[in-house]
Amino acid sequence: MLIGLVGKPNCGKSTFFKAATLSNVLIANYPFATIKANHAMGYIKVECIEKHFKVKCNPREGYCIDGQRFVPIELIDVAGLVSGASEGKGLGNLFLNDLAGADAFIHVVDVSGETDAEGKSTEGYNPNDDIKMIEVELDKWYSEILKKAWKTFARKTMSEDADFSEAIASQFSGLKVNRDHVKEVILKGNFDVKKVTQWGDDEISRFASFLRRVSKPMVIAANKIDAGNGKENYEKLKKEFDYPIFPCSAESELALKEASKSGLIKYISGEDNFEIVKELSDKQKKALDFVKEKVLFEFGNTGVQPILNYVVFDLLKYMAIFPAGSKLADSKGNILPDCFLLPKGSTALDFAYYLHTDIGKNFVKAIDSKTKQAVGKDHKLKHLDAIEIMVR
């Protein structure tokens, strides 16, 4: 799973990226501080099943704090996009290509109103314009890919009586478009696929826009909510756009994560408070008090963790599944070492194949480790299930 961060220059994308991953990336108060795409692991948070079994887990990947399991997902941070990016302005076409493999986007928007469309310092800027600009550039990106091959593609599809959904999915396979995406677009947009050879540029563009929204769902991180006109602009965004929009202070999350890593405080990402565990300097105390009062107490969290969780569990509709044999341990004695993310609707057999092809081929039954009940291959799994696969 790959989640892409998009936004204009100097909106706080790299701060969000570092806050989510603690990766060592350049953060600077000027446009295009990021040029080359950055990849790193962020984490979604779920209730660990260790509580159910009264054990302490030993994650192979990620980590667990006070029964909160953090499961890794991959994030990519590309350079800021500007108007004309889809045509190559600011090397935008290169950065868009870096995003081709993303399953979803987090659009980081500077809601403070203190940076203009190019990321330069200003006052009173309307961040609604940033969302519109990114929408236009992403739509043009999809549209140009489709238009380049449209005439040949449309004629071939009709003359060979090919499956339109399959043909489009194949054309956009590099952008992780599948048949289900295309079918959803046709239904939502009421497109007449029997007349594709008659579609003009407007209809192709409209189709591309629908396809982009379905295949690359997006959430808005209303970043810098604690600065400038942040709260006021956040309310305006909610009224104008139908995207999921979260108040966010990536800088606050990063400060808390780094203070926690240094042993100054105890902080679990996504929570509304932290505990001071070491004596702080006056400067450190003042900074943390600001975060507590202006962000945590006012909005309930910094926004970073809820956004990551929302993307995985609500936008992409995944669930967390734990492999859990009778001893709850792997061959090295690690307790509940793994937690995997599978699409909703996955069955016990799907999970077996996810673990290994041979496990899927030799599937006999599965055991729900919480209830001790045997289940068949068609049994639909639930979020936070603990499953043991029995093979021949």
Image (tube, grey):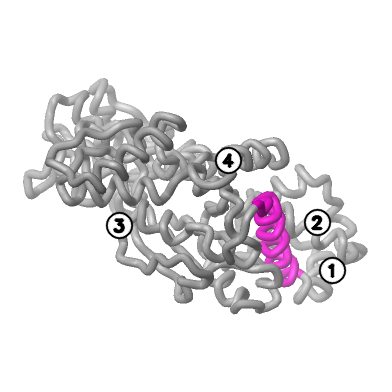
Q: In front here: 46 or 338?
A: 46
Image mark for residue 22: 3
Q: CA distance from mark 4 to mark 3?
A: 23 Å
Q: Name the residue rendered at 26%, 34% in the picture.
A: 274
Image quadrant assignment for residue 203:
bottom right
The part of the chain drawn in magenta is 124-146
Residue highlighted by disc 1: 159
Q: CA distance from mark 1 to mark 4?
A: 44 Å
Give the side of residue 30 with respect to residue 324, left or right.
Answer: right
Among all residues in the image, which is located at the extreme front? 282
Q: x, y percentage for residue 264?
A: 17, 44
Q: x, y percentage for residue 185?
A: 73, 49
Most common SS among magenta residues: helix
Residue highlighted by disc 2: 206
User: Magenta segment: does it hold 132?
Assistant: yes
Q: Name the residue rendered at 14%, 37% in the picture.
A: 277
Q: Amino acid type of disc 3?
A: Leu
In the rendered image, the vertical position of residue 149 relative to residue 291, given as above or below: below
